[in-house]
Image (cartoon, helix red, strand yellow):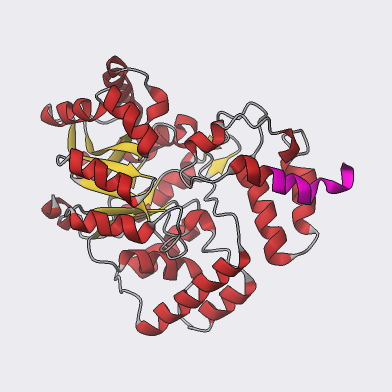
Amino acid sequence: MNQYFAEMKKNFGFGCMRLPMDGEQVDLEQTCKMVDRFLENGFNYFDTAHGYLGGKSETALRECLTKRHKREEYILTNKLTGVYFEKEEDIRPLFESQLEACGVEYFDFYLMHAQSEEIYEKFKKCHAYEAGLKLKEEGKIRHFGISFHDRASVLEKILEENPQIEVVQIQFNYADYEDAAVESRRCYEVCRKYGKPVIVMEPVKGGSLVNLPGEAKEILDGLSGGSPASYAIRFAAGFEGMAMVLSGMSTLEQMEENIGFMKEFKPLAEKELVAVNQVQEIFKAQNLIPCTACRYCTEGCPKHISIPDLFACMNAKKQYKDWNSDYYYNNVHTKHGGKASECIKCGKCEHVCPQHLEIRKLLSEVAEVFEKASN
């Protein structure tokens, strides 16, 4: 397994959850350019899942990657997501549809997706791990693993019960490193304890570590060298055992920047680590909502509330204290309905939130801030 990662040569992967869009469709022309540029620079790891972009991520990869490049030129990871099956018999047809959507005969990695204490119980009930390992025996996947969103104790339980797991994908960034909800550091340490290579997701926390508060940006600008994204990704990639760090790139410019500092990767120097620690403290003091805008919460919302956008407005209000966030709240994100006050407290959003946010409570706070003038 470690040999397999070694053959990739680069520890930087293309996360395909935030591809460039043209309206409601993936911008295939732009995506083709990004795929080609990525491969030209010696990178070859692509990560998708059935639910990314409402199923459009998989088909975009078929059009932009697998139809246009030889199979040996790229590594492709896909995932088994719990909302798309209810019983063991559903898993193989779903998997075959994923192969077809991506235009391949096998996946290099296949991960049990978004494992948490509750979701893991469903996977056990449906014998999903056994189904995945059977697919590996048949050669339809090369390596079997999990992606994980829960406490470190839950991860330890899963790894203890399933020694066949070859790789673990965790959320890991400097903002979440000591966060009590995400437990990035503790999850990483569990992976090291069990000797599992780590794939990093959300190294820039859904863009939160790119669009920094002014005070934090000044600290990193004072280093005179890199962008906020570069320090965040290099922080994650610098830990021992990090086999792959994913970045969900949406533009060719983002890709060019990331390639620039990851092609000849260097871990953060001591001065840079000190600066990152200072930025961590600024984030803690601002008490921002730690939403990564994965948008898992919006698909099942019966009131069609654009939860990540409303949380972004709330964070902007705390950071910048100007009128702009009020404008976006009232004239963009809730113009046609879906105000925070319309939440019916059903809890579907909290059930799927990888960050374990108290979304219902937070929406009440958002409504109090942005809708009090009209109440």
Residue at horizontal 39%, vertical 34%? 118
Would residue 360 appear left or right of 261 to someone viewing this image? right
Question: Residue 134, how many percent across, how many down?
Answer: 15, 26
Would residue 273 appear left or right of 189 to someone viewing this image? right
Residue 214 quadrant: bottom right
Q: Is residue 280 above or below residue 37?
A: below
Q: Is residue 374 magenta?
A: yes
Residue at horizontal 79%, vertical 53%? 326
Residue 308 quadrant: top right
Question: Residue 172, how many percent across, how many down?
Answer: 38, 58
Residue at horizontal 39%, vertical 31%? 50
Q: Is residue 269 above or below residue 145?
A: below
Question: Residue 219, how many percent across, how many down?
Answer: 54, 80
Q: Quadrant of the C terminus?
A: top right
Residue at horizontal 37%, vertical 33%? 119
Give, as a single range, the part of the protein colored magenta. Answer: 364-375
Residue at the limit of the structure toward the top, as seen here: 89
Would residue 190 appear left or right of 133 to someone viewing this image? right
- Res. 254 visible in picture: yes
Q: Is residue 368 magenta?
A: yes
- Res. 67 visible in picture: no
Viewer-closest of 188 and 337:
188
Q: Is residue 76 above or below residue 128?
A: below
Viewer-closest of 250 and 239:
239
Q: Main secondary structure of the magenta part?
A: helix
Viewer-closest of 19 and 213:
213
